[in-house]
Image (cartoon, rainbow, N blue to C red):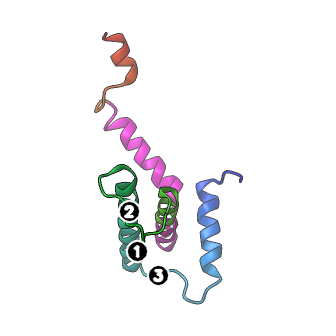
Amino acid sequence: MTKKTMAEMQQEVDTYIGQFKEGYFSPLAMLARLTEELGELAREVNHTYGEKPKKSTEKEKAIEEEMGDMLFVLICLANSLNIDLQEAHDMVMNKFNTRDKDRWTRIEEEVTNE
């Protein structure tokens, strides 16, 4: 499987959704779906790393699948609002690299302080 850029993923989802008359759901409906998918991801993480084992009647779902579901809905929401997720990512990374640049202890600082 070849790696895709965020722009390619957004285009792929747009092409997929574009084949249906219904098109994208409303932003509020997609936010509700995103919240639902987050709950499913939380449940899988809790089963895998938490104290709550699965019931024998529950089917196995991978954490990766749940993250993929969340990513799909997030891309749908971004596309419906004409948001370029690469630009959004770049804005957030700029914020972390400027405003929050001294917030956390860097690995090389730990090494030199020993």
- The span picked out in magenta is 72-101
User: How far apart in space, not on screen, are marks 1 and 2 (Cα)?
Assistant: 23 Å
**Residue 16, x across and y down, in percent:** 63, 75
- Say which label, 2 or 3, has the lower sequence index: 3
Name the quadrant containing residue 27. bottom left
Task: Identify the residue under disc 2.
Answer: 54
**C-beta proximity under 8 Å, tags 1 and 3:** yes
Between disc 1 and disc 2, the foreground one is 2
Q: Nearer the viewer, residue 17 or 111?
A: 111
**Residue 48, x across and y down, in percent:** 40, 53
Task: Identify the residue under disc 3.
Answer: 25
SS under mark 2: loop
User: How far apart in space, not on screen, are marks 1 and 3 (Cα)?
Assistant: 10 Å
Q: Give the residue type at disc 1.
A: Arg
User: How far apart in space, not on screen, are marks 2 and 3 (Cα)?
Assistant: 32 Å
In the rendered image, residue 83 lying in the magenta stretch gets the answer: yes
- Residue count near mark 1 (Cα–Cα under 10 Å), binned few <14, some 14–19, many ≥20: some
Q: Give the residue type at disc 2.
A: Lys
Q: Residue at the location (47% across, 62% down)?
A: 66
**Residue 30, x across and y down, in percent:** 42, 75
SS under mark 3: loop
Q: Residue at the location (28% across, 33% down)?
A: 103
Q: Give the residue type at disc 3.
A: Phe
- Say which label, 1 or 3, has the lower sequence index: 3
Q: Is residue 71 above or below residue 109?
A: below
Name the quadrant containing residue 38. bottom left
In the rendered image, residue 41 lying in the magenta stretch gets the answer: no
Task: Identify the residue under disc 1.
Answer: 33
Quarter of the figure with the N terminus: bottom right
Quarter of the figure with the C terminus: top left
Main secondary structure found in the magenta portion: helix
